[in-house]
Image (spheres, grey):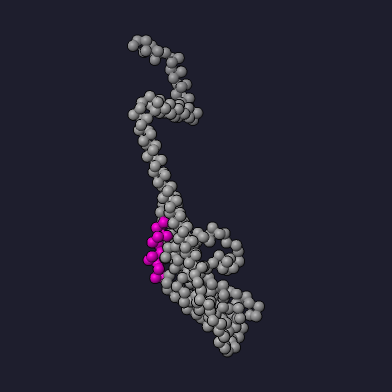
Amino acid sequence: MDTVLKVLRDPLFGVGLAIVLAVLATRVGGCLVRLTLALGSIAAFIWLLVRFEPFENFVVAAVSAVATVLVVLVICLAAIAIVAVMAIYAMHHHETRRPRQPREPRTPPARQPAQYSDDEETARLERWRDDFGELDARLVSIVESLVDLDDDLGLFRGIGRLTAAYFHGLTPHLPDVRRIGDDCDRLLLDLADDLPESFTGVDEARLLALASAGSYLPSRDELEEWVDDEIPWYGYWAVRALCVHRSWRVTASVYAKIQYGRVQVLQCLAAPQF
């Protein structure tokens, strides 16, 4: 005991201890301590795994359980992916490959020449353009209200909010979406009644068919023609995957009808004969 006290009272011991503590207080010293502890933990783990059979059995059982859970998760994700791909393919096949009844040729009805001046025709087209723009703004505001992307939600909260918005976020807004769709159908009927009188490139039958169609998902070629740009295949199929849900399919159909009507009006405004 006296020897220990003598060593502790030695000034050299105090200086040496102060140097050791100063080194440990630095960033390098802290890193060395953490590295030593990490290496010691690994060495202790390996020593226990080699020397004690119960510990080895526990580690093997734990690793087996974790591996089993991971394998089950991978199988479930693969099954969900396969079902989603099959659903998208079936929907696309049903829409593009269904038999169509041959249409009998019909004579276009006789139309009286348009009784509108250039200014009146311009005003009518601009009014229709503004009406379609208003419908587009109303529909986009509904979709944007589902998820507030301005907040810093974090990864998991953001994924949770997007999932909730996809599965039941549109349900309370469906009456408003359907009202927008009814307004769009009335505008398409107005276009079918008036535009063919002045513009020969307007497809009256297509406008009437869209106005009465319950669902309308344009093809990739039609979308590229509307936006005048190439759409990546993965982007198109991602949108089709979203439309597997009924609420999103209804919303996408209304949006597609609005864009079709707006494109028809803009093409008439830019027509050479006009």
Q: Main secondary structure of the magenta part?
A: helix
Q: Residue furthest top?
A: 2
Q: Kindly indicate the quadrant of the structure image that contains residue 229.
A: bottom right
- Residues 149 and 161: in front is 161
- Relative vertical location of residue 182 with respect to residue 164 in this rendering, above or below: below
Could you say where residue 88 lies in the image, as x and y percent from the top left? Answer: 47, 61
Residue 247 x, y percent position in the rendering: 42, 65
Of the pair 145 and 2, the residue shown nearer to us:
145
Magenta-drawn stretch contains 175: yes
Q: Is residue 86 above or below residue 135?
A: above
- Residue at 53% in and 83% down: 193
Q: Residue at horizontal 33%, vertical 11%?
A: 1
Magenta span covers which residues?
A: 163-176
Q: How far across and down, in percent of the image, does residue 12 sit?
A: 45, 14
Which of the image's four quarters has the C terminus? bottom right
Image: 153 above or below 131? above
The part of the image, by quadrant, that contains residue 10 is top left
Residue 115 in sight in this render: no
